[in-house]
Image (cartoon, rainbow, N blue to C red):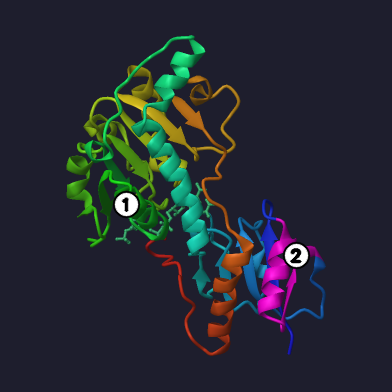
Amino acid sequence: MTETLVFASAVDPIAPWRTALEALLPDVRVRAPEEIGPEDDVRYALVWKPPAGFFARHPGLRLITILGAGADALVGRDDLPDVPVARLSDPEMARMMTHYVLFAVLRYARDIPAFEAAQRAGRWHYLHPREAREIRVGVLGLGDLGGAAARELARQGFAVSGWSRTPKDLPGLTSHAGAAALLPFLGQADILVVMLPLTPETRRLIGPREIAALPPGAKIVNVSRGPVIDEAALVEALRSGHVGGATLDVFEVEPLAEGHPLWGMENVLVTPHLASVAIPASAARQIAHNIRRVWEGLAPEHRVDLARGY
Ligand code: NDP
Ligand code: OXD
């Protein structure tokens, strides 16, 4: 019997997801909310920030899949039905994120912002290149995306350390875990890469005290969620020079407001939340695999722990 997957996203076009999913699951129809009719048996939802009241319209749901890696937008909702929620954990998404992080770290490691400024001033500005192993990169969050980026940075020869909730054993990098290890970890990060999910525990985790713990002139790359960093404290530290530069893909409020101080700061690179995106051709395989697991009465993989927040 044919079942329906309802697809709801204001940012992702449905067509490539429909093509990829229907090819893998011939008995499942992929429909936009406005295409759903009385004949549809809606069992699955693939969503990115669906509107309020969305889930109540589909009482037969058996699996919700978040159209992304971060679960924060869904976790806090009071209208979630009591069905498993999975998120994407896709190697191609990890590859795209790793590219962004590598770009941002290499840009600082090779002093590119200084050369960009020198070029604008028409000035020949020689800075002797440092070896990668002299540059300490700290990665906050060693999950699917953070772990992949940290491993690649280590492969490129940087002195990489990572921090997570539970201890990790990742090749080529030093791992730290737990709240007590955070400040000493930050003190060793010439470049800090933020890859933590947004949860009640991580909201504003990086505040004035944590920023002050960074080595003077440290750079920050935030690719996870804006509210993990206290944005006002970051602006202040960027103004004083204690933080020498920041590459920011995510912000407390998105889109970043017109006139926000971050727009005009010479030592800041702003990108509009696209460090990595869900890629239909590869992520559809994971979604189809999970739907087959539901058919077999098995728990879906990459399930979000709603109590933990990620
Ligand atoms: P995972 O859920 O796989 O990993 C999260 C990591 O953070 C884990 O290592 C976890 O520790 C650690 N962590 C969580 N809470 C704490 C805490 N309180 N203290 C210390 N460590 C903690 O996430 P991903 O790597 O897949 O993704 C990270 C985030 O990236 C997403 O949540 C999303 O917000 C963001 N993202 C941004 C995108 C963009 O385009 N900018 C695109 C995709 C994702 P442990 O391993 O011990 O559980
Ligand atoms: C995600 C994102 O969480 O794109 O997938 O931010």
Kindly report which numbered mark, 1 or 2, lies closer to the viewer in this rendering: 1
Q: Position of residue 4 (x, y in %)?
A: 72, 77
Residue type at the position of mark 2: Pro
Q: Mark 2 sits on what residue?
A: 33
Label 2 Cα neighbours within 10 Å, binned few <14 / some 14-19 / many ≥20: some
Residue 17 belongs to magenta span:
yes
Q: Quadrant of residue 166?
A: bottom left
Residue 26 belongs to magenta span:
yes
Q: Where is ligand 1, by quadrant? A: bottom left
Give SS at disc 1. helix
Residue type at the position of mark 1: Arg
Q: Position of residue 272 (x, y in %)?
A: 57, 38
The image quadrant where one finds the C terminus is bottom left
Q: Is residue 307 left or right of residue 34?
A: left
Q: Earlier in the sequence, mark 1 or mark 2?
A: 2
Q: Going 41% across and 44% down the picture, which residue do you hit?
A: 102
Q: Quick check: 63 above or below 103?
A: below
Q: Position of residue 229 (x, y in %)?
A: 38, 38
* Residue situated furthest top in the rendering: 122
Q: Mark 1 sits on what residue?
A: 155
Q: Which residues are magenta?
A: 13-34
User: Visible in this render: residue 112?
Assistant: yes
